[in-house]
Amino acid sequence: MRVVVTGATGNIGTSTVEALTADPRATSVLGLSRRGPGARAARDEGIEWAEADVTDTDLVPLLRGADAVVHLAWLFQPTHRPAVTWDSNVVGTTRVLDAVADAGVPALVVASSVGAYSPGPKDRAVDESWPTHGWPGAAYSREKAYVERLLDAFEARRPQTRVVRIRPGFVFERQSAAQQRRLFAGPLLPGRLARPGRVPVVPDLPGLRFQALHSADAGQAFTLAALGDARGAFNIAAEPVIDPDVLAGLLDARTVRLPARGVRAALAAAWNLHLVPASPGLFDLALQVPIMDTARARAELGWTPRHTARDAMAAFLEGLRTGAGRDTPPLAPGTGGPARAREIATGVGRKP
């Protein structure tokens, strides 16, 4: 099979490319990325590369002859300019869908998210039938929910195309730490705070329960979806559910009950002052996303995570302490510039 991957140099993209090239069923893999793969990734055997931006590149020639397309390209910043992320994420996905149809690709796998779900319970797990209307206060959630509607329309128009939606929880690994620190915490966060014992308390907030998984396990799920014959939506996440007690254990800290309203107000002030890139809407979303049931992915995709959620979080925290990353532009520690100067110069919450 020939598989084309958009967003192949990001957190999930690099793991998906690795899983695909390790699977003998994938005889040809083409990675598409906006800024190229980086020197080291470009030398990897078993994969071709092409620079492509989903917002303006003619994608049809790149997709022609593919047996499956895995669409992972996604823009998180600039958080203060949601029209820019909408153009990349929603309009860009529309262009990918049109190119898949024009190129006659028989299978499409798309990265959705737990963030596409409407607010849901934290004390029980919901399956893939839970509504995907998102949370309107967060651009990320609005865009993921809209992509779900785009896929609904695409499936209605092209029932002959096999469409798979993967809805991951929060995806972590050691080598994603530099990128995720830039995207969500910003340049002012000292990496040494991720060392056990350096943070004395973890806020115990109402609703602070979420699911996580290792990037390698996410990559395996996308690979199984691309190379198999499954259709529909699949939740993926590992055990245990991450809550304040788990976080406190990883950081050798204690939990302190705090009102969510006060923490949100502090985050909103920092975001409005361009001190952190994560918007208060993302904070609201994290407290409201449901806990997902992953039984369908295990039964129909044959997917079982090899890492626990605690292991994924621990690897990420270790990566924060050491400034870990990969060679690709999105994940490279040097993308933010010396002493993170490029992040500050370009404006916190924008692309450095």
Image (cartoon, grey):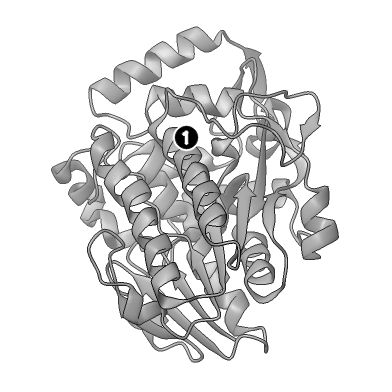
The one nearer the camera, 79 or 119, is 119
Task: Point out the residue furthest to the left here.
Answer: 345
Residue 79, image x, y percentages: 30, 35
Left or right for 234, reference 116: right
Horizontally, residue 212 falls left or right of residue 329, namely right
Residue type (three-letter) at the residue carrying disc 1:
Ser
Which residue has dot 1 on it? Answer: 141
Seen in the image, is 352 located left or right of residue 45? Answer: left
Instruction: Compare residues 230 and 82 and report the one nearer the observer.
Output: 230
Q: Position of residue 34 (x, y in %)?
A: 29, 66
Residue 8 appears in the rendering? no
Quadrant holding the N terminus: bottom right
Residue at (40% x, 39% y) in the render: 184
Viewer-proximal residue among 91 and 17: 91
Residue located at (76% from left, 39% from top): 127
The answer to whether residue 182 of the structure is visible from this angle is yes
Residue occupying image coordinates x 57% and y 56%: 173
Q: Vertically, is 147 above or below 279? A: below
